[in-house]
Image: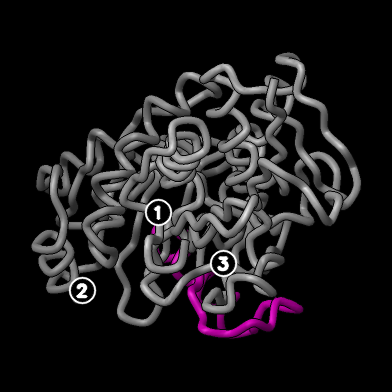
Amino acid sequence: MTIWSVIGSGVAGLAVASEMVSRGAQVQVFDPGGPPGAHGCSWWAGGMLAPWCEYENAEEPVMRLGQTALDWWAARTQVQRCGTLVVANPRDLPDLRRFARSTEAFVEVDQSKIAELEPDLHDFPKGLHFAQEAHLDPRQALHDLYRQLQDQGVVFHRKLAPSRLENAIDCRGLHAREVLHDLRGVKGEMLVIRCPEVTLTRPVRLLHPRMPLYIVPRSDGVYMLGATMIESEDSSRITARSMLELLSAAYALNPAFGEAEVLEIGVDLRPAFPDNLPRIRRLGHMIYANGLYRHGYLLAPALAQGVADLALENKHSEMVDEDRA
């Protein structure tokens, strides 16, 4: 039986391995970093399954293919289907109207409905509720996939993949740039804070002219604040400006966030192609699956399905880059 080798165990690699195994393939995974952890870009994600919100500044395939993610992840890890709430301060209501014109699948909500959905939000006169959207804990999702694959007989090799592998799928993100020359890194910065005084049940996006913020609830009063998108490949530090903007935006949601404890500061580089859409390329014996940009958990299922279609059925999905394959 053919053994498929997946290189990389971030969200792309684990999703590809999971999809391949679900179709009866025999899979092994190579990653010198070992199990999921802070060494991987996927560790620092927000975990929002928000295809309609993301359509505000993304191409149409992000909205359409991203809808696959909700049920795909729900079959593998815990998914919170509470929707997404988008709000703006009174002076920024034109931004809310612009957001509404650029998106779909929402209902407009007034101040009383916002208070009903999230009692700890104050003074927001209008908002948009995307009831079909969901979120997950990305770290728990990675661990769940990893454990499930081990239980299904997938062998994880904590080492570099051999230089000559047949039937291999490269999911290494920016580490594949020596082959995928049009791949670039986009800097993202995020914070993890603890604030038991505030209770939010769903991701909240605050529209702001300088830095739109999203805040995603984890558990036990822990929240992820994110995230910047900076055309820079310096992943060594967060800037003072970014930290100030993230914390100020959180404070604008609820002043109690001013007393929050900062638990983690995350900085990493998202792999992206020029159009910010993922690509599947077949070069020789290697299939490359890359370019998830800021849509890692949202588009990883569709990317994995496209890889499995190509690898197992020689079926070309729209993500396959015909010009370079």
Few, some or many C-alpha atoms within 10 Å of disc 1 (few <14, some 14-19, many ≥20)?
Answer: many
Left or right? Give the position of 192 relative to 70: right
Few, some or many C-alpha atoms within 10 Å of disc 3 (few <14, some 14-19, many ≥20)?
Answer: many
- Element class at badge 1: loop
Q: Which label sits on residue 271?
A: 3
Q: Which residues, given as a range, are shown in magenta?
A: 228-255
Q: Amino acid at mark 1?
A: Val
The residue identified by callout 2 is: 92
Residue 232 is covered by the magenta coloring: yes
The residue identified by callout 1 is: 320
Asked whether residue 123 appears in the rendered view, the answer is no
Q: Earlier in the sequence, mark 3 or mark 2?
A: 2
- Element class at badge 3: strand
Percent from the top left, x then y, of residue 206?
34, 62
Residue 110 is covered by the magenta coloring: no
Which of 131 and 256 lies nearest the eye of the viewer?
Answer: 131
Q: Residue furthest right?
A: 159
